[in-house]
Amino acid sequence: MSVMTTQLEARRISTERPGAGSSESADSAVTTLADMRKGQTAHVVDVCDELDPASARRMFDLGFAPGAEVEMLRKAPMADPVVFRIAGYDIALRRVQARCIHVAITT
């Protein structure tokens, strides 16, 4: 196992939505990638612990790291997969994977 995979396996991120316990307005702006609408942009907040360490590492390698800007481009006709633009390229994720990435909506 790599050092990054070991660190991802050891960390525990709460399954609560990030920002819980803070002001209502800040909490309402935090959602998941799966809940974004077409054209919205957001910044990645964290990855939930529902993903196994290898999948979490893969998301990190693809650019879904805290602070990264992501834009929702389009959804397939049955709303799965969803296409996002991150780090200058487009990537399609299944909704189940997109639900594990928490983001703060910017526009």
Image: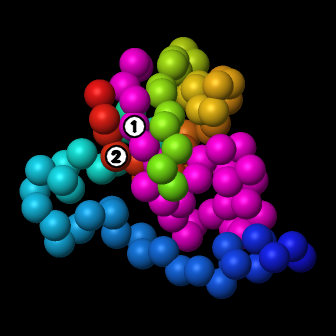
Helix, strand or loop for disc 2:
strand
Say few, some or many: other residues with alpha carbon within 10 Å of mark 1 (under 14 / 14 to 19 / 20 or more): many
Mark 1 touches mark 2? (CB < 8 Å): yes
Q: How is the image coloured?
A: rainbow
Which of the 4 image quarters holds residue 49? bottom right
Q: What residue appears at the point 63 percent right and 33 percent down from the top-left corner? A: 87
Query: Which kind of residue does numbered mark 2 sit on?
Result: Ala
Q: What residue appears at the point 10 percent right and 61 percent down from the top-left corner? A: 23
Which of the 4 image quarters holds residue 51? bottom right
**Circle number at residue 104:** 2
Q: What residue appears at the point 53 percent right and 60 percent down from the top-left corner? A: 47
Q: Which residues are magenta?
A: 37-65
Foreground pick, 32 / 81? 32
Give the quarter of the figure containing the C terminus. top left
Compared across the picture, whether 35 is left or right of 84 comes to left
Image coords of residue 100 (percent x, y): 52, 55
**Circle number at residue 52:** none
Image coords of residue 104 (percent x, y): 34, 46
Residue marked by disc 1? 42
Image coords of residue 60 (percent x, y): 67, 54
